[in-house]
Amino acid sequence: MLDHLVLATPDLAGTVDLVHLLSGVRPVPGGRHEAWGTANYLLGVGEQAYLEIIGPDPDRVVEPTVFGLGTLTGPSLMTWAARATDIDASVAAARARGVDPGTPQAMGRVATDGRRLSWRLTPPGTGVVPFLIDWGDTAHPAGNLPVAPLVELHAMSPDPEPLRTTLAALDVTLPVRPANRVGLRSVIHGLNGEFELITGP
């Protein structure tokens, strides 16, 4: 189940303005990830899922490298998160099927309204294979967000079958279409019409 899309950018404020222009809906501040040196803005995409726009925190004390931020020159749909209700069981099941999503780690951030959000996730990388996230007792961030509905999400790959096998081992569903490169493509319906967010420049 889609939890959120990750749109990484070296220019957080500029990309927020761009998504606002494309969708007609302004993303709202999420908070800071001090350990990563990042901050984010969020936009709901329906079905209790959201778009995370993540970039360097203006007040960072470390330089961000997560989600490719060390080398990105523009916004890119870098990866996505699949929601787990028992992340330890999900990891164990995936490992039994021959895929290791990594060991879950605890994280958290303070929202702009002062609430502390906590979650556990497998190590996030880049690419079309999702990381897993479990919000535990924390209310899901999508609950009170402005929304621009997600119309479509699919992966692209020159060799779809191994990717489909990996996704099945994680018990997640994502269409995989043949293409000349690996990446993600999403289509979002905004107040000004549909627009796409994709992997790469």
Image: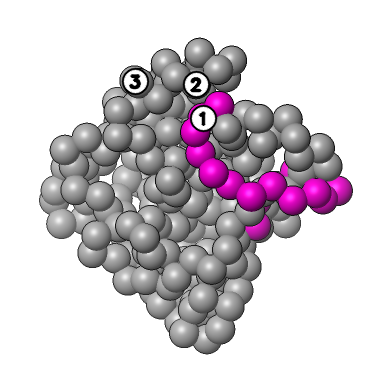
Q: Is 12 drawn above or below residue 161 in the view shown?
A: below
Question: Horizontal and vertical percent for residue 187?
Answer: 59, 67
> Which stretch is magenta?
169-185
**Could you tell me if residue 193 is visible in this image?**
yes
The residue carrying mark 3 is 88
The residue carrying mark 1 is 170
Q: Quadrant of residue 136?
A: top left
**Could you tell me if residue 41 is visible in this image?**
no
Q: Secondary structure at mark 3?
A: helix
Tell me how far mark 1 sits from mark 3, CA to CA.
Answer: 12 Å
Outermost residue to the left: 114
Q: Amino acid at mark 1?
A: Leu
Marked residue nearer the N-terminal end (1 or 2): 2
The residue located at (59%, 52%) in the rendering is 77
Q: Amino acid at mark 2?
A: Ala
Marked residue nearer the N-terminal end (3 or 2): 3
Question: Horizontal and vertical percent for residue 55?
Answer: 48, 50
- Near mark 1 (Cα within 10 A), the count class, few <14, some 14-19 or many ≥20, is many
Specify the quadrant that holds the C terminus: bottom right
Q: Amino acid at mark 3?
A: Asp
Marked residue nearer the N-terminal end (1 or 3): 3
